[in-house]
Structures are given as C-alpha cells and as structure tokens.
Image (cartoon, grey):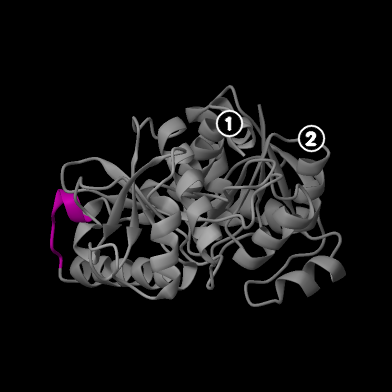
Amino acid sequence: MRIGIDIMGGDFAPLEALKGCLDATKTFPEVELVLFGDEAEVNKAYQAIGVEPGTLQLVHCPETIGMAEHPTKALSQKKMSSISVGFHYLKEKQIDAFIGAGNTGAMMVGSIFSVKPIEGVFRPTITSILPKADGSIGLLLDVGANADCKPDVLYQFGLLGSLFARHVYKIDNPKVGLLNIGEEPGKGNLATQATFNLMQDTTEYNFIGNVEGRDLFDSKVDVIVCDGFTGNIVLKACETMYYNLKKRQIKDEFLDRFNYENYGGTPILGVNAPVIIGHGISKANSFVNMIRLAKEVVETGLIEKIKSSF
C-alpha cells in the first residue's frame, strides 16, 4: 500500500508532517509513504530533527498552495504544487490514498476535478467525529464542505455517513438522525422538513428521525446529518469549548476525547479514491492518525462499497 502525503500542508509543515510520517513508518511498516513537497524545505526539516535527508521517498514539488489562496485559481496556476502533483499521482493510481492538512478548499476541489465524484453522488462531504459519553464515537456530516444543501443531498449524506460508520468504525447498523430543532416530524425549516420526508421511508439506512443538539454526545444516534453551515458551527463550538476547558487545566477522560489529534482527519466521502483532509494546525500525532485512517479506508474497501451502494 502506497499513501501520499502533502508534506507542505498545514501551519507547522513540513517539520511536524515529516515527524508524523517518520513515526508512522514505525507504526505501519507495511505502508510505503510518498511525500510531496519542496526538497530544500523538507531537507531542512530532516536536519532539524537529526534524520538523514532522503529517508522517505520524496516527489519534489517547487510550488505550494497557501492556506488563504483561492482553491480553484491556485490549482490551475500552480501545476507543480504539492497538492496538484499529489492528486495527479492519485488519479494515475501511483498511490492508493492522498493526505493533506493544507488548504481544505484546494483538497476538496482537487479531489472533485482529479479523481471525481462517484457516479450518482450529488456532492462529496466531510465528517467530524463525535465522542460519546459511553466511550463510543459517532459522526457528524457535513461539517463545512457544503454550506447550502437541498434535501436530496442531505439524504445522500445519511447513506455516505452510514457506510463510513459501518465499514471503517465497525458500527453495526448505525442509527442515522437528522439534526433539527425538535424531534417531531414537522419541526425545522423547509429543507429539514423535506429531508425528513425523504429519509423516513428509506430502506438504504437505519433512519431514526430528527435529533437535537442535546443528542450529539449520547448513544441515541450514531450518524447525525446536517448542512455544512450548521455542522461547521457545531464543530467550531465544540473545539472552542475543549480549548477553554483545557486552559482551565480541567482533566477529564471524556474531555480528552475531543482532541482532534486523536482522529487525524476526515475522508472526503463520495469521491473515487481515498482522500483525507487534516486540521490546519495538525502536528506529528495527527499525521500518524491521518495515515492510520487512510490505511483503514483502503483496507476496508470503503470506496468500492460506496460505489456499489450508489
């Protein structure tokens, strides 16, 4: 298995990304890592951590797409960027998965224009882990890729999230809920009301009805569906609460499970190859867990299972 990494992606790249990749080679010796990035910058990172340059395979990419650059424009203008070249390798099947913690928009656009959405998928989506009070985990999607969603798109998010939860996280017959302002069928705005009507008769996944914000962290539901506007607000609110409580030196096992580094990143669900997006502030441990997630997505054949379902 060959996994590609945008070594220039993220606020602490390439140093932290390289540290994570070197750690991952010890944890997953069966995985071959292919780094995409500027050779001079990567060699400086090798020297900073006292490792011989060239330890891992590197594809030299002289250009880098910055975090604030316009995704589509940057991809079209910077053909030799680490993201562009990485997606070329993925499209040509020279790597089995591609990972990046840089410009999220560029990773999303790159996946859509290179490996393309799976036939039948209206919009690819990204997820976030929801730690549960009983020690299990759940999923929230979308969390920012699709701010405005029509009911048929939200319906598909339920199927994509259910497949991901079942095959990668081994949740048997995952319970899918629609995030709303009340449990009753008539609650919500026009989009959620119409989505509920689509979901309630489905035989493609286990829809349990509307769920509320109070249900995010309990075992009532495994997969929570919402538009990316709502999901991103929920995600950022949870992150802020975590950081504020940690600043107050509150120690709690449940609180520790909100640390994004434990999970690494999220796959882009609905495209034809495994693409993992990491947090922009990812450090070494995050990259290890991103590689772990990419490995699991490849090994479980998640992409083929999604194709079969659609």
The spot of residue 179 in percent (x, y) is 33, 62
From the viewer's side, name the closer residue of 75 and 173.
Answer: 173
Tell me: residue 53, above or below residue 72. above
State the extent of the magenta-drawn residues as a range: 249-255
Residue 92 visible: yes
Tell me: residue 121, above or below residue 71. above
Q: Is residue 268 left or right of residue 136?
A: right
- Residue type pointed to by label 1: Lys
Give me the residue at 81% from left, 55% from top.
61
The spot of residue 108 in percent (x, y) is 65, 60
Residue at the spot of label 2: 93
Is residue 250 a member of the stretch shown in magenta? yes
The spot of residue 16 in percent (x, y) is 53, 54
Residue at the spot of label 1: 305
Residue 298: quadrant of the picture: top right
From the viewer's side, name the closer residue of 274 and 289.
Answer: 274
From the viewer's side, name the closer residue of 36 and 152.
Answer: 152
Q: Is residue 182 left or right of residue 70?
A: left
Residue 4: quadrant of the picture: top right
Give me the residue at 23% from left, 63% from top.
184
Tell me: residue 78, above or below residue 132. below
